[in-house]
Amino acid sequence: MNWTLEVVTIPVTDMDRAKEFYAEKCGFTIDLDDEVAPGTRIVQATPPGSRCSLALLSGMPPMPGTRVMAPGTLHGLQLCVTDIEAARIALVETGVDVSPVMHVGANGWEEGKGGTWNSFLSFEDPDGNGWVVQEAPSELSER
């Protein structure tokens, strides 16, 4: 049996603002925008080329036995691209506040590209949920 990661939930305070950020600024496809129950809205957004989507949540009660995650508390989500510099330019051009390209060097984080699998940038969504983008040597389907 395969266990596939297909949806990551993202807690947000303003659904329309989050939807606009992920669609217009990040270029994600909006797959779903639905009020599944009174006061409970889900917007599903998928990064280009990804099989894993984001579920932006507002008003969703926590599933029994789980904890509530406050908007802005999700950090360390990681996307991969094959051209980190082009990804940075694309984000900057749409108005995203993005870090410089960085790599892990002899003294910790250093600006500029590193070797294979060692080039990163970071940004946050409007609620402060944190993202890392890593350069991969090829598309996932080619690895």
Image: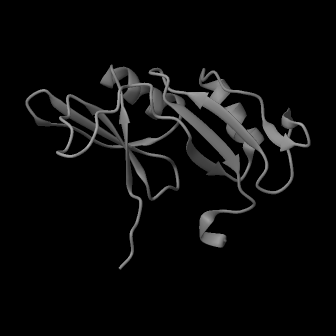
Q: Which colour style is shown?
A: one colour
- Quarter of the view holding residue 63: top left
Residue 120: where, in percent of width, then height? 73, 41
Q: Residue at x 39, y 75 (%)?
A: 2
Q: Is residue 17 left or right of residue 115?
A: left
Q: Residue furthest front?
A: 65
- Relative to 66, say whether 49 is above or below: below
- Name the image quarter holding the C terminus: bottom right
Q: Is residue 91 left or right of residue 6?
A: right
Q: Residue furthest left?
A: 38
Residue 40: where, in percent of width, then height? 16, 32
Q: Residue at x 33, y 20 (%)?
A: 13
- Relative to 83, say whether 99 is above or below: above
Q: Is residue 119 left or right of residue 105?
A: left
- Relative to 83, say whether 90 is above or below: above
Which one is in front, 71 or 54?
71
Which one is in front, 77 or 139?
77
- Name the image quarter holding the N terminus: bottom left
Q: Residue furthest bottom?
A: 1
Q: Residue furthest right?
A: 106
Which one is in front, 105 or 59?
105
Residue 72: where, in percent of width, then height? 44, 25
- Quarter of the view holding residue 6: bottom left
Q: Residue at x 71, y 63 (%)?
A: 138
Q: Is residue 7 left or right of residue 57?
A: right
Residue 43: where, in percent of width, then height? 30, 37
